[in-house]
């Protein structure tokens, strides 16, 4: 369940980063670069999981995510800029 929650949060976060950092003319292309890997993974992952569980061990299905996650982390840190969050809008009310 926790993995599904994290995966569900990735889509709005990555699109927000694209919108903030990409010029309007390149946004469609940038979002396409984000969409195609997700579409490809949803096609290949069940087949890979079936092959691993049939010919190896079902435990390998879970271990495949570790190197893929680490590689994605390294690539994301190199490719994505550090996007600062904008300051919160002040409503003029005092907070307690």
Image: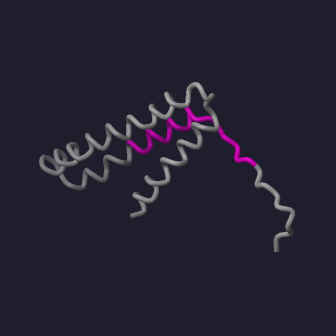
| Quadrant occupied by the N terminus | bottom left
At 48% across and 47% down in the image, what residue appears? 11
Residue at the spot x=54%, y=42% of the render? 15
Residue 40: give x, y in percent of width and height. Answer: 32, 37
Asked whether, in this view, residue 22 is left or right of residue 68, the answer is: right
Camera-side residue of 54 and 94 = 94
Q: Which residues are magenta?
A: 68-86
Determine whether 62 is above or below 44 in the image. below
Q: Which residue occupies the extreme bottom position in the image?
A: 96
Q: Report whether 68 appears left or right of 90.
A: left
User: How would you classify the magenta stretch by its main secondary structure?
Assistant: helix
The answer to if 70 sits in the magenta stretch is yes
Of all residues shown, which one is farthest toward the top? 25
| Residue drawn at the location 57% of the way across and 37% of the way down | 18
Residue at 38% across, 43% down: 67
Q: Can you give x and y, in whole percent of width and height, for residue 9 in the image?
A: 49, 53
Q: Is residue 9 above or below residue 36?
A: below
Residue 63 placement, left or right of 56: right
Please identify the quadrant where the C terminus is shown: bottom right
Most distant residue in the left direction: 55
Residue 65: x and y in percent read: 35, 48
| Figure label count | 0
- Magenta-drawn stretch contains 80: yes
Q: Between residues 95 and 60, which one lies in front from this camera angle?
A: 95
Q: Pinpoint residue 20: horizontal percent, then vertical percent.
A: 64, 38
């Amino acid at each position: 369940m926790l993995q599904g929650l994290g995966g569900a949060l990735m889509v709005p976060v990555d699109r927000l980063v694209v919108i903030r950092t990409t010029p309007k003319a390149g946004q469609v292309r940038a979002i396409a670069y984000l969409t195609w890997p997700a579409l490809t993974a949803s096609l290949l992952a069940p087949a890979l999981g079936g092959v691993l569980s049939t010919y190896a061990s079902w435990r390998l299905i879970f271990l495949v995510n570790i190197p893929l996650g680490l590689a994605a982390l390294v690539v994301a840190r190199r490719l994505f800029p550090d996007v600062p969050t904008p300051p919160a809008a002040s409503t003029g009310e005092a907070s307690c």
